[in-house]
Image (cartoon, rainbow, N blue to C red):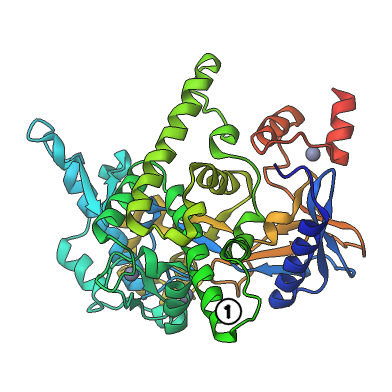
């Protein structure tokens, strides 16, 4: 559906990307649309090695449901919030719940307490947790509620978490501005609290549970739809305000509201999703049908929760499939490094006496945390400009978080000198892998790579 780029659409897309580049203040690049390879990002000026090319804000993003027990982050910008103590205490708290839930328990008692519930998600107990030391509950809760302070944590201050004003107790923010921005962007429709603007909080709860039990990509798709509805309503209100004489038809407004999402379109989810290794090729049709049915169930639940007659077009299975497909086919990992890691590294680097003193207090916590002491925030997000960057196995740029990048924004840095007019490329995969493995991984993105490295490797195979 995106193979033909009509002139009108091309002009509209050019305009959209130009605006985006200006708003991101990254004027060294431009997005070009090409009939054969689609979109690409090109340098407008020269970049030196290690120079910042682009910081791309998230359009819509989620922290993975399973990651929520590991890190407490702002629901809008994904910056860590609370304190080092709270981050550690919270993680140990959930870990302890998991351990007491299954590893020591006699399974004959009841099959039900093998998992604990958190925000409606089932948290599976790690099989290895029994090997870790567990701390008494009192110690963990005093860390969580701020009664116990660890040494040197004042060197790593984090913003205090602000609860969602909608009253859901599930979204937290690093600042009032993030709380407001999230509310306006999508959360007002997807909040389960009493101030929610959804039609049915109960249905919303069911939709969220279904997504947590199956695939949390549905939560991201719901955000994209809520984002579009709210944008549409805002544009409509502005239109009424202006009392425009030739008022634009509603459909055109909806298309306009939808542009930031639709511009990332590639293919439908059930057509493009890679076949898992454990599914036999002969079962492919059944597998894709199953995926489609899953999306259908999810969409029905979402409809009951936030349907808007004027935006009816957004609630078709076709659109839903394309939105999810877009998340599957773009390079969308959201990663924010944990300040807890920096903290323990800092302790480790202290001069001997100070280090010994500090470690006496911190070691039991580090032992109790085990190998996963520094889990980062992980999720999926759509970055409108980064998603236009094409892949190369010998890329000239990469996504890289510098010391100062503490939130979920995508940061793209030049790997070598990039000259004016050159295309900026990143690698979607581990480019050190052998040729055949690279091609297999890239096939999941729907293309076969013809970069200089691949051309060279293919001729020598
Ligand atoms: Zn924030
Ligand atoms: Zn809320
Ligand atoms: Zn290649």
Q: Image quarter for residue 18?
A: bottom right
Residue 78 locus on image (x, y percent): 48, 67
Q: Residue furthest right?
A: 420
Q: Please tell me whether residue 242 is drawn above or below residue 321 in the rendered image.
A: below
The quadrant of the picture occupied by the N terminus is top right
Relative to 63, is 436 on the left or the right? right
- Counting labels gives 1
x, y (%) of residue 355?
42, 72
Residue 213 position, x and y percent, is 33, 43
419 sits to left or right of 31: right
> Which residue reaches farthest top?
282
Any part of residue 336 in sight: no
Q: Which of 333 and 181 is in front in this view?
A: 181
Query: In the figure, 58 relative to 317: above or below?
Result: below
Return the residue at label 1: 239
Q: Quadrant of residue 388?
A: bottom right
Residue 365 position within the rendered picture, expressed as x and y whole percent measured from the top left:
31, 62
Label 1 secondary element: helix
Quarter of the image where ligand 3 sits: top right
The part of the image, by quadrant, that contains residue 294 is: top left
Q: In which quarter of the image is the C terminus?
A: top right
In front of the other: 228 or 212: 228
In the rendered image, is residue 441 in sight? Answer: yes
Left or right position of 208 against 396:
left
Residue 29 shown left or right of residue 300 in the figure:
right
Graded by Cα atoms within 10 Å as few (under 14), some (14 to 19) or many (20 or more), the crowding at tag 1 reads some
Residue drawn where x is 22% and y is 54% of the image: 96
């Amino acid at each position: 559906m995106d193979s033909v780029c009509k002139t009108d659409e091309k002009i509209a897309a050019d305009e959209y990307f130009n605006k985006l580049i200006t708003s991101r203040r990254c004027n060294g690049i431009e997005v070009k649309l090409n009939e054969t390879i689609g979109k690409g990002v090109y340098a407008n000026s020269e970049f030196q090695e290690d120079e910042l090319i682009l910081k791309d804000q998230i359009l819509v993003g989620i922290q993975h449901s399973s990651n929520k027990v590991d890190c407490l982050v702002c629901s809008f910008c994904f910056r860590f919030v609370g304190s080092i103590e709270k981050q550690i205490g919270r993680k140990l708290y959930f870990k302890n719940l998991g351990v007491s839930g299954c590893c020591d328990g006699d399974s004959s008692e009841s099959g039900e307490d093998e998992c604990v519930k958190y925000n409606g998600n089932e948290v599976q107990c790690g099989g290895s947790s029994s090997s870790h030391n567990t701390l008494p509950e009192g110690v963990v809760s005093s860390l969580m509620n701020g009664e116990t302070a660890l040494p040197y944590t004042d060197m790593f201050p984090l913003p205090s978490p602000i609860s969602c004003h909608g009253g859901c107790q599930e979204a937290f923010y690093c600042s009032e501005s993030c709380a407001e921005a999230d509310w306006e962007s999508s959360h007002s429709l997807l909040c389960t609290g009493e101030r929610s603007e959804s039609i049915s909080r109960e249905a919303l709860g069911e939709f969220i549970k279904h997504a947590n039990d199956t695939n949390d990509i549905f939560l991201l798709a719901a955000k994209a739809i809520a984002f579009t509805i709210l944008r549409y309503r805002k544009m409509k209100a502005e239109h009424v305000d202006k009392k425009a004489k030739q008022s634009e038809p509603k459909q055109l407004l909806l298309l306009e509201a939808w542009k930031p999402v639709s511009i990332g379109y590639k293919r439908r989810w059930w057509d493009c999703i890679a076949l898992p290794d454990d599914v036999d090729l002969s079962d492919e049709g059944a597998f894709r049908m199953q995926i489609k049915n899953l999306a259908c169930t999810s969409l029905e639940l979402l409809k009951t929760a936030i349907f808007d007659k004027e935006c009816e077009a957004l609630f078709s299975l076709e659109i839903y499939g394309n939105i999810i497909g877009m998340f599957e086919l773009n390079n969308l990992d959201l990663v924010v490094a944990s300040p807890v890691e920096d903290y323990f590294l800092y302790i480790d680097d202290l001069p001997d006496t100070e280090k010994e003193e500090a470690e006496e207090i911190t070691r039991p916590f580090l032992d109790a945390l085990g190998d996963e002491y520094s889990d980062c925030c992980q999720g999926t997000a759509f970055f409108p400009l980064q998603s236009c960057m094409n892949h190369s196995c010998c890329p000239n740029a990469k996504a890289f978080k510098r010391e100062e990048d503490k939130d979920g924004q995508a940061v793209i840095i030049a790997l070598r000198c990039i000259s004016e007019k050159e295309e900026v490329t990143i690698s979607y995969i581990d480019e050190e892998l052998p040729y055949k493995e690279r091609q297999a991984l890239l096939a999941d993105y729907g293309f076969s790579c013809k970069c200089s490295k691949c051309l060279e490797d293919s001729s020598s195979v």
